[in-house]
Image: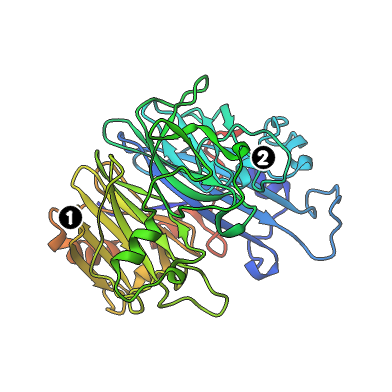
Amino acid sequence: MTHAIPVPLPSALVDHHAVDLKRKNTDGWGVAVDDVTTTSTGEIYALYGVHRHTYGVADDEADPAKAHFGYSLLTRYAPDGTPLATAVSGQSEYLRQDATFGGPTTGLGEDLWWAKGLCVLPNGTLAATGPGDQTHLITADLTAVTARHRMPLRSYDDGPRNPFASWISTTPAGRMLCTTGEYGLYNYANLLDNIVSITDEPLTPTSKPTLRALASMEAEPVKHTEADLRPDVLFNGEPVGMDHRPRPSLTEHLTELEQTAHQWDWRNARLGRPAVVREDLFVVPVFGHIFRGGSRGQRFAFVLVNDKGEIVGQLGGMHLYRDSPFTGFCFEIAADPARERIYHLNRYGLFAWTATGVRAQRLDLEDKRYKLLKHFRLVDCSPAGELILVHRTQHLMLRLPCPASLGGLGQVVEDALRSYAKERTLLKRQWQPVNWHWTDCTAPLHRL
């Protein structure tokens, strides 16, 4: 069944800061959804942020109705889409000390603001991950943070060095597929995602498992020293770092694979978030350099890697220019391990593949039946096989039902989009949004 679900702002936050919901995003405020994840029981978690910065207002403005603000929000939904609870965390020290939403925080706000990924671990704990291999463990009811792992974003910065992963996904058996970063990629001091790894052990508030490296994007980061070694990320039993990591790297493999390619095609490449296709197979996105003047036509690949670290293929049937994910930066990919399906949505089409990498469907978004999908971003595939999409400007989630076969995907999407228009109209009557900003006062509000 198609289901549209609002992503709301807490009414208490809107009232406290006297937020003008009619204000345009170009005026220095906005709401953006970072990630959505679903549980085996049908519950949904959404991670999103809201910020306001007004020209001419001092940074130390004390009046909350005028002050700048930035909050990370986590909302938990029942399977029917009803908000059950929302957790809020302020970005700055001033907002962390504000007791309006249940008392001061414990200093988490600045870190959680940068979180971009969500994953429900096998024990029900929620993991929020982001750059710097930061991982925050949050209770399922969103009432407490039970563990924090992070490290500085730049090699020369001071700070705690207790990282875990920048992205986490779970396999059907409960293993964790992770992405970790390294300093020195392309001579950058920043910590950039470079290693895809897996672990058989659980991540708990009291223990951090060892990660087994499966693949690297760039084989030779520069200026590595022993200080850059991660004792918890191993390849062949030794810490990853310096000249020791999986070879050939993904970019080396792609350069050798394509007769017309050369090493500069993958210079400054980036690693996307891997997805679990089945227990022993994963798909890893790799994207070429993003140019300021436009990158449509730049190289990209979705590489298939097994749990032994072997590169076994890649997703086929995409044209570098006509199907480019660089337009709108649509780099997300989702997989359905139960049915061994892989999905990707960008501004040109909705694509579906089997586990072998053979393209089974391409829905052209120029077709008026599917054109509405241009406004959505693919964020997840639920355990039930539903595709979870997020509208870019209307702050709505959309659950697309699982087709019986990929051959019927087009009809399922057509019916779902037709139903979505009706549901959206009904939601507008019920919620009375202002400029597509939804507010909610029913869900309990927690302060992380």
Vertical arrangement, residue 423 with respect to residue 197, above or below = below
**Can I make out residue 388 in this image?**
no
Q: How many marks?
A: 2
Q: Label 2, secondary structure: give it.
A: helix
**Residue at left 42%, top 39%?**
119
In front of the other: 383 or 284? 284
**Residue at left 76%, top 54%?**
68
Residue 109: image tag: 2
Q: Nearer the viewer, mark 2 or mark 1?
A: 1
Q: Residues within 10 Å of mark 1 (few under 14, many from 20)?
A: some
Q: Residues within 10 Å of mark 2 (few under 14, many from 20)?
A: many
**Residue at left 66%, top 55%?**
51
Based on the displayed image, in which of its 4 quarters is residue 175 positioned? top left
In front of the other: 400 or 14? 400
Whether residue 33 sits left or right of residue 303 in the image: it is right
Q: Label 1, secondary structure: give it.
A: loop
Q: Which amino acid type corresponds to the residue marked 1 in the rendered image?
A: Thr
Whether residue 437 sits left or right of residue 51 in the image: it is left
